[in-house]
Image: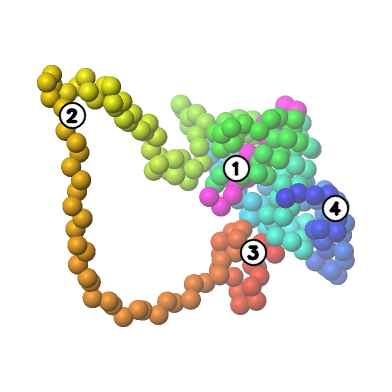
């Protein structure tokens, strides 16, 4: 979600806790974000998560947001994109979610840049990232080419290529495949097997699961707030 409504994302200067309009905070964060993204682009294969970028811009500017990073990261990447020169590849491609997918924030940056959102967002981001590494002077290995983020590539490889289901034979083809003078044998119905009763085990008490931050997946404190994203 992204919005220019200052009332939805309160911000303030840490020193003195002075309120700052969101538009002013965003402008300051965008300058810091651009520097962090360029630094990322100068190391081939590097990525920065949305949570990390949000933490960095708040720390460097001394302006804290009163909402989680996921609430305003699209606005931030959009502001960075608006400030880029037309010759530069989109720095927003270097900023990913925790699972290293590009996410909606990158799609928003594409819209700000006047580009349509492609069907394969992660593949598009991989190609743009590669141009970022080239443009901002990263040392690129010989023969390197655009590649998906490691976790995205690993997940796709684990799924494997999709196999089309085998088409069932039509009754006419089944009849032709049978020997002349014979009738297709009816499929024998399997006899149901009686399930053996298993002794019931004493139920074990379940241990309470720790609550995780929905943005960066770190364990929340007893207060229920994430110290990294807030």
Residue that label 4 marks: 5
Tell me if residue 118 comes above or below residue 70 in the rendering.
Answer: above
Residue that label 3 marks: 228
Q: In percent of the image, x 31 and y 80: which residue is there?
A: 202
Q: Earlier in the sequence, mark 2 or mark 3?
A: 2
Residue 56 percent location from the top left of the image: 68, 55
Secondary element under disc 4, as helix, strand or loop, is loop
Is 8 colored magenta in this rendering? no
Q: In percent of the image, x 21 and y 55: which residue is there?
A: 192
Is 96 colored magenta in this rendering? yes
Residue that label 2 marks: 184
Mark 1 and mark 3 residues within 8 Å of each other at the beta carbon:
no
Label 2 vs label 4: CA separation? Answer: 72 Å
Residues drawn in magenta: 86-99
Can residue 180 be spotted in the picture?
Answer: yes
Label 2 vs label 1: CA separation? Answer: 55 Å
Nearer the observer, 9 or 27? 9
Label 2 vs label 3: CA separation? Answer: 68 Å
């Amino acid at each position: 979600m992204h919005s220019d409504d200052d009332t939805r994302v309160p911000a303030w200067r840490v020193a003195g806790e002075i309120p700052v309009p969101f538009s002013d905070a965003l402008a300051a964060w965008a300058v810091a974000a651009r520097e962090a993204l360029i630094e990322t682009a100068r190391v081939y294969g590097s990525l920065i998560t949305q949570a990390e970028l949000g933490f960095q811009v708040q720390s460097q500017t001394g302006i804290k947001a009163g909402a989680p990073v996921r609430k305003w990261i699209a606005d931030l990447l959009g502001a960075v994109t608006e400030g880029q020169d037309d010759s530069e590849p989109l720095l927003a491609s270097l900023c990913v979610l925790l699972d290293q997918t590009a996410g909606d924030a990158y799609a928003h940056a594409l819209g700000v840049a006047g580009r349509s959102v492609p069907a394969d967002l992660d593949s598009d981001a991989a190609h743009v990232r590669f141009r970022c590494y080239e443009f901002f002077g990263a040392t690129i290995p010989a023969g390197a080419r655009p590649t998906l983020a490691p976790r995205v590539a690993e997940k796709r490889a684990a799924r494997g290529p999709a196999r089309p289901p085998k088409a069932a034979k039509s009754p006419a083809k089944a009849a032709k495949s049978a020997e002349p003078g014979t009738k297709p044998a009816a499929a024998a119905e399997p006899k149901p097997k009686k399930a053996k009763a298993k002794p019931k085990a004493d139920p074990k008490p379940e241990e309470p699961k720790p609550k995780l931050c929905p943005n960066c997946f770190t364990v929340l404190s007893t207060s229920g707030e994430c110290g990294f994203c807030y």
